[in-house]
Image (cartoon, coloured by chain):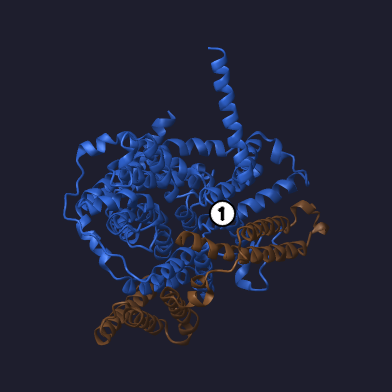
Chain colours: A blue, B brown
Amino acid sequence: MFMLEGLGMLGDGILHFLTPLSLFNVAWATLLGIVIGMLPGLTATMGVALLVTLTYKMPGDQAILALICMYVGAIYGGSRSAILLNIPGTPASAATSLDGFPLARQGKAGYAMGLATTSSAIGTIVGIICLAVFAPLLAELAFDFGTYEFFWLAAFGMVISGQLTSVNDPLKGYIAGILGLLVAMIGMESLQAYHRFTFGVPQLSGGIDIIPAMVGAFGFAEILSVMRRRFDAKVLVSTDRVIPHFRDVWNYRRTAIRSGIIGTFVGVIPGVGEDIGSWASYAAARRASKEKEKFGKGSYEGLTAAETGNSAVIPGALIPVLTLAIPGSTAAAVLIAAMFIHDIRPGPMLMIENPGFLYQVVAMLLFTTLAITIYGLSMTKILVRVLAIPREKLMPVVYVLCVVGPFAITQRMFDVYVMVFFGLAGFVLREMKYPMAPIVLGIILGTLLDTSLRRGLLLTNGDPSPFFTRPISMLLCGITVLAILLSIPAVGRLVRRAFQAIGRLRKSSRNACP
Amino acid sequence: MEMVEDNKRLTRADLWTGIVFILLGLAVVYAAWAMPRLESRGVHPFAAPGVVPLLLGGLLTLCGSLLGWRALRGGALHRLPAEQSMRYLLGMVETRRLLVMVALTLGYTLILIGLVPFWTATALYVFVSIVVFEHFLSETPRPLARCASLAALQAVLVALVVTVVFQAGFLVRLP
């Protein structure tokens, strides 16, 4: 019954966007996304953030449609430059270049791009299925979440994002997260209407808007990184066949589905995005592969895993967006901000207030997947010409958009200054190897964390016990504490040693009683 | 080898940023402590507006201390080799390019916009940016006349299109 209702709403969602205007929006937004993803220095998050500023006058459903098309297009587009330049167009394609670039040097650039296209499409489809099946279930579960659970959810999101986006140095991930949360503390808080850290500046009382901050941290900061480099990269040419052989797609079906599921799962984890999804899928594929030695030297399987993994993250990242209003990736954080601009309130109430919207998002993803497949298989050779645009000509124009975009939404110069501040700060932090995602997540989750904690304590008149005794709270608290403990090197070593000892004990006991 | 040297510079930077985060954390703790407790309104002290900032400030101080301590143990105070020194760093082509880009973007955003109409500011910024990076800072400089004329054309086009799209299309009153 539940499934049938879902299918009906999915049909409505697809029909909703089967209009010339919607299809036109899918066509241009996906194409623009691919181009932005291809150009090194222009990332999906930046593209989505800039497009929010260009679509805020459109009706809500069409604006979100354009943004999702931009998101999917950009993550997919990044594979082009990863293959042809050995520079990932977006961080999501870093794993793609490991096998994509060697393939291009073997003269198989076109084929690699074709395989990347089908892999991306498969990845998105696996993610879409998970979104359509699990989001309603999670939304149902989220109804039992009270203020205590939301506090732990936000805390868990911050910890896990800090850890996974900076695997070699979780301390920097945590610091980034705390900085983001502190930014969210600026402005009037909602419980007692007290102005925190506003220093008498009236523009700060509304808090720091996420869009200018994102345009700065992902736009301006990237422009500085790109322009600093002394040399521009050389593009390899592709003259070979693009459309993949069916047997290559079929041979790696297991890898594709496994990578799709890993990608979706990584997407669901708050603030952990496409790059991690892609690396995780790549690592899992190499471990399971019969042709391990080919990885890194031009393996079709490696390319399939990386591209399926990063594309599957997108629908995965939308699951917590729609059900809990918690972003699964940085671009998803921008999407949340955009939804609020268009009066769509993501979170547990969405399924009641606007039950069709989830399936509209599924339909949007289906349309854009179709679009990347068509573009990718038919226009690859034309599209790669974009890579010939010199950065000296492109970046000043992008900067102009970074200035005018944030200004357009609120029409105040203050937001432009916010963009500049976050751009410079983001650049410096990135140079010192701080991940950006926890900062973004902090800005989005700061208010939730703050109000949930204090509202909970207000309700109990200062008694913190419900935070630890309610079943879901207890579980979330346990996972959060465990995640923090495991990130401390000494504890990690201790756990590893304990596991090894248990392993040895088992072995010896098995030997003792055959 | 390069990796190790890069790490040394990063370790030194970690020490400084650690100190900055400790100071920032303490400043936040102080500001949070000074926030009103609103007891007269019957608010429990644990639910006062300063609670979460206080926690965050404390955590930032803790993390900053850990970062600084780790950097000290990693040899942050050891002398950097000559090719890692600040003077060498400032003399690098990459640094020069970066500083020029920052100067151009800030000059455009903080000075030009507001001083002259938006489209003039934009055209000027785009033009100067392209000429500087294609001719003066390029490894393979393009002839100035050709580069400047193409840049001028692009600058005017970009300024006009952006102004028209935002002003007529989105009804934004540009600065």
Q: Secondary structure at mark 1?
A: helix
Front-most of A365 and B124?
Answer: B124
Name the residue at 40% across, 74% down. A400
Position of residue A452 in the picture relative to residue A22 (left or right): right
Up the image or down, A121 lies above or below A503; here it is below
How far from the left and from the top, in percent, is residue A290?
A: 32, 33
- The amino acid type of the residue labelled 1 equals Gly
Judge the density around disc 1: few (<14), some (14-19), many (≥20) Cα neighbours within 10 Å: many
The image shows residue A440 at horizontal and vertical percentages of 53, 57
The residue lying toward the viewer, choosing from A170 and A80, is A170
Instruction: Compare residues A385 and B79 and report the one nearer the observer.
Output: B79
Residue in the picture at 60% in, 40% down: A493
Left or right of residue A221, residue A74 in this image: left
Q: In which quarter of the view is residue A379 placed? A: bottom left
Q: Farthest right residue?
A: B40
Q: Say which residue appears at 38% left-offset and 47% top-offset.
A: A310
Rendered residue at 70%/46% (across/down): A456
**Where is residue A219, by image quadrant?**
bottom left
Q: Nearer the viewer, residue A338 or A215?
A: A215
Q: Is residue B8 above or below residue A71?
A: below
Q: Is residue B58 left or right of residue B13?
A: right
Chain on which label 1 sits: A
Whether residue A197 is visible to the viewer of this picture, yes or no, is: yes
The answer, for residue A9, to whether it is visible in the render is no
Residue A287 is situated, as x and y percent measured from the top left of the image, at: 39, 37
The residue that disc 1 covers is: A173
Measured as percent of width and height from the top left, residue A386 is found at 26, 64
